[in-house]
Amino acid sequence: MSDSYLLAVFIGGTVIITMFAAMMTIFLIVQKHRQNRTRMERQQTDFATKSSMMSSRIELQEQALEFVAQEIHDNLGQVLSFSCLQLADIRNSVPESDLRGRLSNNLDVTRKAVRELRMLSHNLSGRLVEQRPLNEVVESELERIRSFCPMECKLTVTGADIELPPETRLLIFRIVQEALQNVVKHSEAKSVAIRMNYGHRLFTLKLSDDGKGINNTENEANRSLGMTNMRQRARLMKGDLLVSSNEGRGTLITLNIPSR
């Protein structure tokens, strides 16, 4: 065989091998792209399913809270209001004495209970919460806590006055309620501070306390129903919720959500 023939065979073989390698590379790239696209579609489907389930679960919780709020307002609140009227009539019908003084004290306590129940009813009702500014309902919840707990509560608001959608305000408020409930029940804190910042693109809420914090054995709290509800609500707003705590040095909860 001549050298030119061998050279032609070598070049032809090289071209075929190169083309085959290129085709295999293209095939693998296409397959990888298809796999990634399938995985992304599956993740999107899973996320949509989980979001729908979370939304349904939270909607059921809101319906339950609405029912409790209505029962407090229509039944318990009215019974106590009627008791106030009766106590006032009895007090006014007796002469000035220790008995009248005790009746006045009982009347004051009952009236205070009526006010607190009315405030609790409003804060449990999602419909009423959505109709009020977020700053107002958060301050109302802090006022309710001050009425029965000797803990300093402070709210600070900064940034632009951006109107968040009603459903977003409700989700944020429920997170605040859950976090404050944990502080009151478990932290042994003397003070709690809430700082809300309205940014042009990001709304940030920081809730901090000076309580005992969460130690290693209490890290299960991160997986508790309350914490799970808070994180689910944050995800529904396409945001994130971070918890930072050191034993003996309090706890900081940070919520970040898009404000646009």
Image: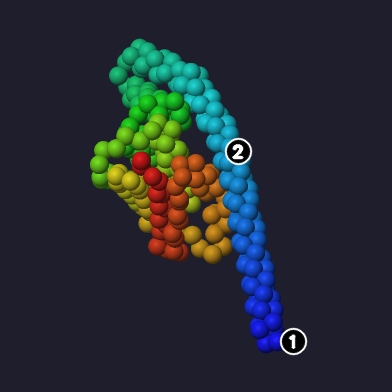
Q: Residue at x 57, y 57 (%)?
A: 220
Q: Secondary structure at mark 1?
A: loop
Q: Quadrant of residue 54?
A: top right
Q: Position of residue 171 (x, y in %)?
A: 45, 38
Residue 103 versus residue 176 in the image, above or below: above
**CA neighbours of label 2 inside 10 A, class few (<14), some (14 to 19), many (20+):** few
Mark 2 = which residue?
53
- Camera sees residue 150: no
- Kind of residue at disc 1: Met
- Camera sees residue 239: yes
Left or right of residue 1, residue 84 in this image:
left
**Circle on res. 1:** 1
The quarter in which the N terminus is drawn is bottom right
The quarter in which the C terminus is drawn is top left
Distance from Cα at disc 1 to Cα at disc 2: 75 Å
Q: Relative to the observer, which residue lies in front, 227 or 148? A: 227
